[in-house]
Amino acid sequence: MSPQSFPDSQRMAPKRALPTRSNKSGPEPNTVNGPSRRANNKAKATESIPNGSQALPNGKRRRAPSPNSSVRTKRLKHTPAQNQAPTQRLDIYVFGTNENGVLGLGPDVGPADITRPRLNPLLAADSVGVVQVAVGGMHCVALTHDNRILTWGVNDKGALGRDTAWDGGLVERREDGEEDSDHGEKINPKEATPGEVEMRDVPDGTVFTQVAAGDSASFALTREGDVYGWGTMLQTSEAKEGFLPGIARQAMPMRVPSLPPIAKVVLGSNHVVALTSSGHVYTWGHSHEQGQLGRRVGPHCNRPVLVPQKLSLRNIVDIGTGADHSFAIRKHGLVFGWGANNFGQTGVESSAGLDSATVFTPEVIKSLKGLGTVKQISGGNKHTLALTDQGDCFAWGQYDTSATGIDPSHLPPVGVGVDARGKPRMLKRPTRIPGLKTMCVATGGDHSIAISTGDQAFSWGFNCNRQTGHKGDDDVQTPTLIQSQAVPGKSLIWAGAGGNFSLLAGVPRSKG
């Protein structure tokens, strides 16, 4: 599968903070997933997949029907196919923090940082057959060759789409109110091990073609263009949860109504952008204050934001998101941006850098014109990368986290915002990262990864948890080759980045 067909739902952690994309978290209502670990800083994890010795939850498995299958469908039998799932089986490599089991390595691997890419044996290409992965702030979603959806990581708000209740995560509270545990921090084995999403309300015969992940929500696209989702999205200003009108949190996959056939879906921290097969764009979510939905929303108006609504854009061929900003690429390469712009992350210069800077409706990114045809665009917390058809990678947005990958000596003479001390703070205009030819880019909270045309991985940015794949915890200022003994003989074709962790996908290197 071509790299750009992997959705960049890789997100996002606040710099030098908890590995999520949101600086706030709401109250933790009682759920089947047990006590919250976001609130009390306890560790997390997931359920098993077939790897030769582990059983699936409830013994259930969802497979794609064969071409001659007579499987009944409740709603899909007269709907023409719109999308196709990738077929290339992938080896998945993980690195960065394993806090809360976000690397999916199982309960035997603790919450320590993994410095170099490590092959995840629970996602082996030959036995599991992952064909596509989406990375959220603190969880991951994977689609397999046999039509299963696997999840792992944090499940406090239902992002895994399955029951991960675990008694081992409970701690006793002493009379003085302090928590007491003789075992220290533990990882929930049901969250730390990739496990299959429960499909109780999904019609038989449904074939999935793509998955996507946000901070606390996950979505899956079907062959017919339907969208299923689970988890929740957070309204950051009031710390309220919302999935759809009347539903604060969805435990298992539920079809999103009122959508035409969808060709691609991507997520920001708490908002969704969907591209239709006819080139239109729909948005919804529970966080809209920074314009990430691309439409103005009045105060106290919760229902419209959680209902998908069409933007005025036409002839769109691809979409992308950052934490609180969004993008759309029109046919022939014209790019639109909207959302939070306090560091110029939308690429719209007019208001870039103001604390309250917001682009409420899609605007053309004029400074991208003439730089080549953009074929992929992806944002982090406050920075953005765009990849052109010539393999050039352009960066803009927050500069002082090193997430743009540009050395000070290569900064442009104009379009650079500085702080009170005169030091570069942001790039208001797309700036080419020198010496890098790329076929896939990924953006985490404050770090970035690029897969070069030579099938190698380069990374840069914030490195507090080794999420760049490099030793030490100093920021990596410019693109630096990721070294690992785990990937010889493999061609790397994709990268994904979460809050403080990262993934790579590889296939056997062709001979000759």
Image (tube, rainbow, N blue to C red):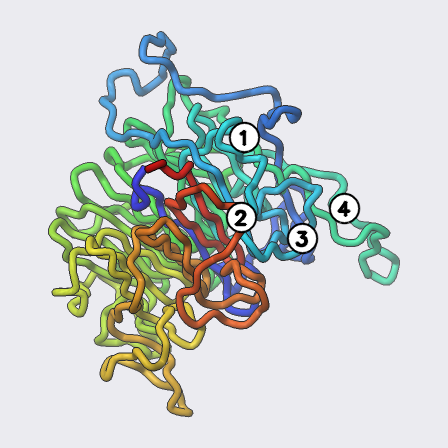
Q: Nearer the viewer, mark 3 or mark 4?
A: 3
Circle 3 packing at 10 Å, graded few (<14), some (14-19), many (20+), is many
Q: Quadrant of residue 405?
A: bottom left
Disc 2 or 4, which lies upstream in sequence?
2
Which residue bears the numbered disc 4? 170
Give the left or right position of residue 104, taking residue 398 as reference: right
Which residue bears the numbered disc 2? 94
Q: Nearer the viewer, mark 2 or mark 4?
A: 2
Q: Amino acid at mark 4?
A: Leu
Q: Which mark is residue 111?
A: 3
Q: Amino acid at mark 1?
A: Glu
x 82%, y 54%: residue: 173
Q: Secondary structure at mark 4?
A: loop
For the N terminus, give its image quadrant.
top left
**Measured Cα–Cα span from mark 2 to mark 3:** 13 Å
Residue 11 visible in rendering: yes
